[in-house]
Amino acid sequence: AEALVDESRRAWHAGVGSWGSVTDVNSASIGIELQNIGHAPFPEPQMAALERLLAAIFARWSLGPPSVIGHSDLAPTRKADPGPHFDWRRLALGGLSVWPEAGAGQPAADLAESFQTSAHAFGYPKADLATVLHAFRLRFRPWAKGPLDATDAAMAADLAARYPAA
């Protein structure tokens, strides 16, 4: 792996998108491009290399697990990568990303409003429910189908409580 742009320089790697209060993600992030067509799991050597790279970036820039997001997180209306086969949970278990605790969040009675509020507080940009739910599930519940449910809302509430976006 080689750097196409030095980490201290701005690159147009994310395109238009936002995360939390950051509306120019390109100027406030380091982009990592992973090769995968999106229909298969990421190979073990690629995941291991990513883990080493993230640990090194964390050390160089004093970053932590909440700072790791995907294109589908910051631009859910136009991006779907890294996709449903990316192992976010593996990164979280290694201290390199975040993962919601099952049943820890307490959604409000109105699931849609609770989910949208929590997802936005966690960092997802404001968009229609279907778009945000799709992006959220790509990362945290890629196997889930159907309409928003209490598990989605509870997971989003937990993430918002533990990792509110800056």
Image (spheres, rainbow, N blue to C red):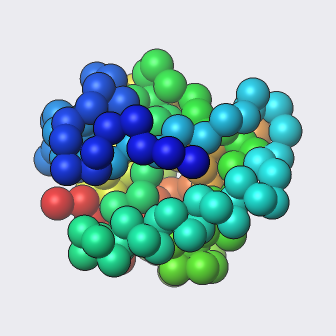
Tell me if residue 94 comes above or below residue 82 in the rendering: below
In depth, the one of 46 and 110 nearer the eye is 46
Residue located 43% across and 51% down the image:
69
Relative horizontal placement of residue 144, taking residue 15 as reference (left or right) = right
x and y percentages locating residue 165 in the rendered image? 24, 60
In which quarter of the view is residue 160 placed?
bottom left
In depth, the one of 109 and 87 nearer the eye is 87
Total numbered labels placed on residues in the image: 0
Is residue 38 visible in the rendered image? The answer is yes
In depth, the one of 21 and 48 nearer the eye is 48
x and y percentages locating residue 128 in the rendered image? 40, 26
In which quarter of the view is residue 9 placed?
top left
Q: Residue furthest front?
A: 2
Relative horizontal placement of residue 4, taking residue 45 as reference (left or right) = left
Residue located 25% across and 68% down the image:
61
Is residue 14 visible in the rendered image? The answer is no
Relative horizontal placement of residue 5, taking residue 147 as reference (left or right) = left
x and y percentages locating residue 55 in the rendered image? 47, 73
x and y percentages locating residue 54 in the rendered image? 47, 65
Query: Can you say which quadrant of the picture contains the C terminus?
Result: bottom left
Residue located 50% across and 45% down the image:
2
In depth, the one of 130 and 9 nearer the eye is 9
